[in-house]
Amino acid sequence: MKDWKFEDPPNVAVLSDKSIFKRGDWIAYVLREDDNDDDDDDEGGSWQFYSSDTRDRDESDIMLVGLQEVIARDESILALADLPKGWHAWRNSKSAPWQRAKSHPTRQRQRMNVLALMLHKFSGT
């Protein structure tokens, strides 16, 4: 992809709600982890993408994909290339503009961060 605006490379592994890729659900929520969100020695800033489904998710609902795969599915994500670490973005419909704010940990997010760490170590990235 030319004009790549993300600081991460196109093939960086990100977490995605499976329903985005398996059922074609639209992306409603994006989280960019803070540097301190996991216990690994990486630089932090991992990306997570969730559909509009509001149910609680567990590890069986999440998959690893490349950032470029998410963008190929939804080019509106390009507007979030400058989302700071520790922030999140959301929208109320597929055509709505993205809104942004500094992120605050929740129990669901803490569970997803543990999952992210496990997947990160499992994938060897």
Image (tube, rainbow, N blue to C red):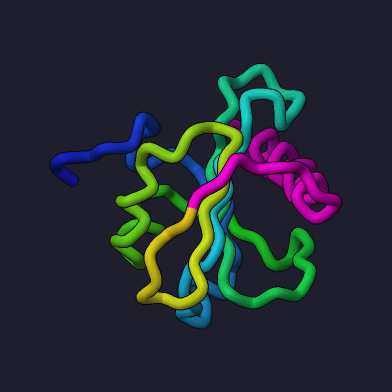
Q: Is residue 94 left or right of residue 45?
A: left
Question: What residue is drawn where x is 34% and y is 57%?
Answer: 71
Can you give x and y, in whole percent of width and height, for residue 9 in the image? 35, 34
Q: Residue furthest bottom?
A: 23
Question: What residue is drawn where x is 44% and y is 40%?
Answer: 83
Dividing the picture into quadrants, the one containing residue 118 is top right
Q: Is residue 61 magenta?
A: no
Q: Residue furthest left?
A: 2
Question: What residue is drawn where x is 56% and y is 46%?
Answer: 101
> Which image quadrant: the C terminus?
top right
62 or 88: nearer the eye? Answer: 88
Q: Is residue 40 left or right of residue 16?
A: right
61 or 6: nearer the eye? Answer: 6
Q: Main secondary structure of the magenta part?
A: helix
Q: Residue furthest right?
A: 107
Dividing the picture into quadrants, the one containing residue 59 is bottom right
Q: Residue furthest top?
A: 41
Can you give x and y, in whole percent of width and height, for residue 86 in the image? 60, 35
Above or below 98: residue 85: above
**Image mark count:** 0
Q: Which residues are magenta?
A: 100-125
Can you give x and y, in whole percent of width and height, for residue 96 in the image? 39, 72
Q: Is residue 114 magenta?
A: yes
Q: Is residue 88 left or right of residue 41?
A: left
Question: What residue is drawn where x is 19% and y is 46%?
Answer: 1
Can you give x and y, in whole percent of width and height, for residue 21 in the image? 48, 71
Above or below 95: residue 115: above
90 or 78: nearer the eye? Answer: 90
